Structure formats: C-alpha cells, structure tokens
C-alpha cells in the first residue's frame, strides 16, 4: 500500500514554484499585471498600453512594442548602452553587476514608519524621500513586503520600472539614471505592496502561466540597430 501511495505521489505535478499573477491598480483603477511562469520568467503589462510590455527571461529584461503589425524587441541593457553613446554616459551603473554598487541620488533616503497588512500580506511602511528635488522634505509612503513568494513579482516589477524610466532619458537626461538607481535601491527592501500616488496590490494568486506568455515575440534588435534608431530619432528632435 505504501509503495502504491508513493507511486501516485510521484505522478503528481510538482508545485514547489507555481506560476503567479499579481495585479496592481493605480489611483484611476487602471491595472498593471505581472505574470510569473514556473521557470521564473515573467511578463509585465499595463492596461493603458496594450501594445507595450516587458518580458523578463533568462536573467535579462526586454521591452516589447508593436507598431503596424510589426514587433520590436529590445534588451534593456542594449538600449542603455545605445543611449550612452548618444547622450552623456549615464547608465553604466544601472544594469549588470555595477547596479548593486551605485550611490543613491542626492536627497534619497528611506525611513521605516511601522507595519501594515495589504490583502493579508505583511508589509513594512516606509517614508521615501527624494522623489521631488524641489521638495527635499516631502516623502511618499511605500509599503514593502519581504515575503519570499512575492519576490519574483518584485524582480519583474523592478526591471520594468527601471527600463521604462530609462526610456525617458531624452527628456530627463541625467535624472533618468538617478531615478532608475533610486528605484533599484527601493527594491532592495523587498516587493512593494503599495506606492503612494501610484500603485497598490489588488490581487495575488497562483496561476497557470503558459510558456507562450513570457516568450519573446520576435528576435531582439542588436545594439547596433538600436543605436542607429536612437540617432535617427535624436536627429528629428
């Protein structure tokens, strides 16, 4: 009988790391959905940008867009390198091993303020300063969780926020790198459950996420191709 039970257990699917789906909502009720497959790859989508999303796979983050039925895929680190050849080199420490050693921007600091649960998830409340250079003593309340189950969601969310901030470099200049670095620092505390004025976790569940959801829809563009496109775009500005 014990042998039969053991054989039945071996036939059951493994669930040590099930797929996950987290939904965040902004103040207008619009959704950011993060889906993590059982292999750790993830896709991040914003409801108001259906043709633009991010994919985390094999330790690399990619920005995906679709224009006139054509897919465009770019590795975030290649985009950063291309920007650094057109603009002053500001993204060198935002990706890869160097990202863990970069200093915070001036005025950025994080202060603990207590505990709070959101949807049953225990979080530490922090006052985060430095979002507005013009108001150095103004802070935003951020609730962050260290629950291991939430960390894959946090990793995908971090890379999406850093990469989309980087895309504002032509407008923000050096500030884009500083904001991206501060985002990385904030995520060293864990996965946000709530960011004042921005997002709050609305649901979190195990889910069957098919491999096709986190697959790249096209071959990523090379660093040389991205550099050519950025130069052409800059010439039109």
Image: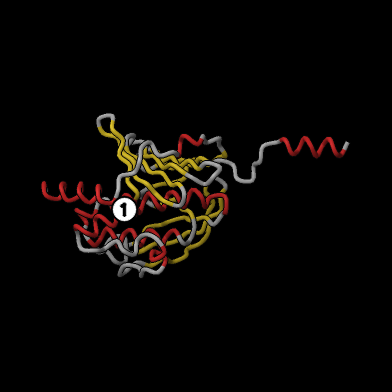
Q: Nearer the viewer, residue 159 or 108?
A: 159
When the figure is inspected, residue 148 is found, relative to residue 90, above or below; the finding is above
The quarter holding residue 219 reads top left
Counting from the top left corner in percent of width and height, residue 59 is at 45, 52
Element type at marker 1? Answer: helix
Counting from the top left corner in percent of width and height, residue 49 is at 32, 37
**Left or right of 60 on screen, residue 226:** left
**Left or right of 233 on screen, residue 226:** right
Q: Nearer the viewer, residue 100 or 221?
A: 221
For the question of whether residue 193 can be seen, the reply is no
The quarter holding residue 174 reads bottom left
Counting from the top left corner in percent of width and height, residue 124 is at 51, 59
Write the residue at 77% across / 35% down. Answer: 8
Write the residue at 50% across / 43% down. Answer: 36
In the image, farthest residue toward the top: 69
Counting from the top left corner in percent of width and height, residue 24 is at 44, 43
Q: For mark 1, what is the residue?
A: 78
Image colouring? secondary structure
**Left or right of 231 on screen, residue 218:** right
For the question of whether residue 143 can be seen, the reply is yes
In the image, farthest residue toward the right: 1
Quadrant position of the N terminus in the picture:
top right
The quarter holding residue 39 reads top right
Write the residue at 41% across / 44% down. Answer: 55
Write the residue at 41% across / 53% down. Answer: 158
């Amino acid at each position: 009988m014990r042998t039969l039970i053991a054989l039945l257990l071996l036939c059951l699917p493994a669930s040590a790391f099930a797929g996950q789906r987290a939904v965040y909502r902004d103040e207008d009720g619009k959704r950011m959905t993060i889906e993590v497959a059982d292999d750790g790859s993830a896709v991040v989508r914003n409801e108001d940008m259906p043709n633009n999303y991010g994919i985390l796979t094999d330790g690399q983050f990619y920005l995906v867009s679709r224009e006139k039925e054509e897919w465009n895929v770019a590795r975030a680190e290649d985009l950063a390198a291309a920007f650094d050849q057109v603009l002053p080199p500001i993204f060198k420490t935002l990706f890869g091993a160097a990202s863990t050693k970069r200093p915070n921007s001036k005025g950025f600091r994080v202060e603990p303020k207590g505990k709070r649960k959101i949807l049953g998830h225990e979080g530490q409340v922090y006052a985060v300063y430095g979002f507005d250079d013009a108001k150095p003593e103004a802070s935003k309340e951020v609730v962050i969780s260290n629950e291991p189950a939430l960390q894959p969601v946090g990793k995908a969310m971090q890379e999406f926020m850093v990469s989309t901030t980087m895309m504002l470099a032509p407008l923000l200049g050096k500030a884009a790198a500083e904001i991206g670095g501060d985002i990385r620092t904030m995520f060293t505390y864990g996965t946000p459950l709530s960011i004042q004025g921005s997002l709050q976790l609305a649901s979190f569940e195990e889910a069957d996420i098919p491999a096709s959801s986190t697959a790249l829809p096209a071959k990523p563009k090379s660093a040389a191709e991205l550099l050519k496109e950025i130069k052409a775009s800059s010439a039109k500005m």
